[in-house]
Amino acid sequence: MTNQNQTETNKFEQFDVAIVGAGINGAVASAALSAAGLKVLLVDRGDFAGFTSQESSNLVWGGIKYLQSYEFWLVFKLCLARNRLMRAYPNRIRQIGFLASLGPTAPFGRLLGTFGTLFYWGIGLFGTKPPLSYSARSAKRLEPNLITGRKAVKYFDAELPDNDSRFVFDFVKQAMKQGAQARNYTELVGAEFDGEWTLRLQSLSGESHVIAKTVINSAGPFASDVTSMLNSPTKASLVFSKGVHFVLNRKLTSKYQVLAFWDEQGRLFYVLPMGDRSMVGTTDTRVDHPVTEVTDEDVEFVLRQINAQMELAEPITKDQIVSARCGVRPLVIESAGDGNIADWHQLSRKHVVEGDKDRKVVTILGGKLTDCLNVGEELVGELNRFGLKVKVPGRWFGEGSQIRKDEFFALIRRLAKSDPQLIADGLWRRHGDEAFEIVGDSELDDIVPGLGITEQEIRYIAINERVQKREDLLRRRLPISMARSDAELRANQPLQKLLVELGL
Ligand SMILES: Cc1cc2nc3c(=O)[nH]c(=O)nc-3n(C[C@H](O)[C@H](O)[C@H](O)COP(=O)(O)OP(=O)(O)OC[C@H]3O[C@@H](n4cnc5c(N)ncnc54)[C@H](O)[C@@H]3O)c2cc1C
């Protein structure tokens, strides 16, 4: 490097690690590494969790379906990851029953189903409530929309009641509290390595440069674009499986539970809670590119499955769809991929971390929301091997103290004009102790009736949670535009007025 170049780079801000991509993998990396004492920069070219990590089924689960492909070790590890997350997030992650209706497309009957769910409970070290088995009559009594005459089994996993993207943002928030810089709408557009990295970043306000000792490539389905930019190829590669969900304008379950079915291809298919509505899906279609969209075939497929598996007074039609979620699962193939994957649906959901010590790059491929704490820890280990000064991370995940929860709920009972339980639950779950600050001592009302979201919370999030666009707030920090259609949102005058006032 010439002296002039050296003087130039000295002006750039310096980091121990720059993390490219703020989906779940980048977000946990930022939280774990900043807790390990490193100076961290996290960038995403869109919003935090604005790509794959906002399109999931919102489940924290051990993957019961992988038992069918005999991936016992993966299921065991995912169950442990699920149990650990459930313990760390007693409010943000909720245990939920999966009532699986055993129709003609189910791969087994009640006896094998009962055995399978018991085995799943055991492999998960009994970390959830025990499974249950139902006769056709008791299944129908439990969930009247199930098809008469079908037996059922119930097992337990967990879900993210506030959406996957909110969960991801919690890690970003934690990282920022620990001193990390997190920049959304900031893309890595160029990189030069000279013992350390000079990175060229493009944000909404223009181009800038930073210096980083190491780079973590957590660009999810775009990981190979970033490996090319960094000239740091990986042994493993990715293939993509598209998955679509639809939120309906009605609730298909009579109580808080997931309904599980097997679709016409023999894949598990769900009815999941989404606020006061239901989300149905998903699909599993091989695609070549990460950017996908919902097609007419997707709509027809999902509606056909759900109408075939439920006994509804009126069938579900296209006009009942409130919103859609569509993303690709980044699936790892460890050998040189020739695309001839024998059984597409059996492809493993594991993740792979590859370190390139010479060029100081770590790439993370694949994975699940459920496995996020392990990913964070593996990345700390990897940077340790690179010789960075990495401390044993302090507490970098989990909810804050629950000591004032009762006090907070009592306060909301006094302040809320409607739905005190819903409002208190939501505020405490999303913000913990900070909820006191959000609420102050003003009267509270549900600005999106049925969701328990108040004007005070929207204001707080818009100002404090790096919201740049309307969608960041309505789609990702809160699940409003998932559970409400565009027309419903347009008709909500108080909300529209507030958004305009907030400049969104
Ligand atoms: C339909 C579906 C259902 C799923 N259900 C579940 C589930 O229920 N439970 C579960 O545990 N997992 C589930 N998953 C898996 C899980 O959602 C994904 O594995 C996970 O979200 C991937 O996260 P990621 O951080 O690797 O990628 P992403 O979330 O895609 O993040 C990568 C980020 O990198 C950014 N980026 C790319 N290039 C650049 C660049 N040059 N500069 C800056 N930023 C860049 C992108 O904008 C993006 O935000 C599901 C996935 C799908 C698709």
Image: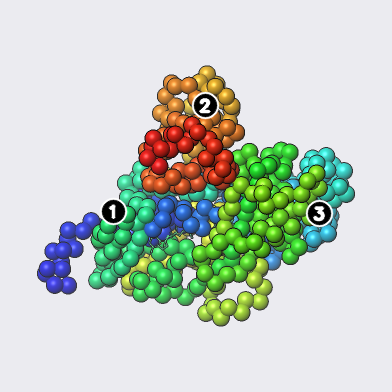
* Amino acid at circle 2: Asp
Disc 1 from disc 3: Cα separation: 55 Å
Secondary structure category for the residue under label 2: loop
From the viewer's perspective, is residue 443 above or below residue 435?
above
Farthest top residue? 414
Identify the residue shown where x is 35% and y is 43%: 177
> Mark number for residue 102?
3
Q: What's the residue type where badge 3 is placed?
A: Leu
The answer to which image quadrant residue 224 occupies is bottom left
Dot 1 corresponds to which residue?
205
Q: Earlier in the sequence, mark 1 or mark 2?
A: 1
Q: Residue furthest left?
A: 3
Q: CA distance from mark 3 to mark 2?
A: 43 Å
**Residue at figure coordinates x 44%, y 27% from the top left:** 439
Q: Quadrant of the N terminus?
A: bottom left
Q: Are marks 1 and 2 in contact (CB under 8 Å)?
A: no
What residue is shown with label 2?
Answer: 445
Image spot of residue 130 (x, y percent): 72, 45
- Does residue 391 appear anywhere in the picture? no
Inspect the image, locate mark 1, and give the three-letter code of the amino acid beneath it.
Ser
Residue lying at 53% horizontally and 49% vertically, measured from the top left: 164
Question: In this orientation, which residue lies closer to the viewer: 156 or 393?
Answer: 156
Q: Residues within 10 Å of mark 2 (few under 14, many from 20)?
A: some
- Distance between mark 1 and mark 2 Cα atoms: 36 Å
Q: Which label was assigned to residue 80?
A: none
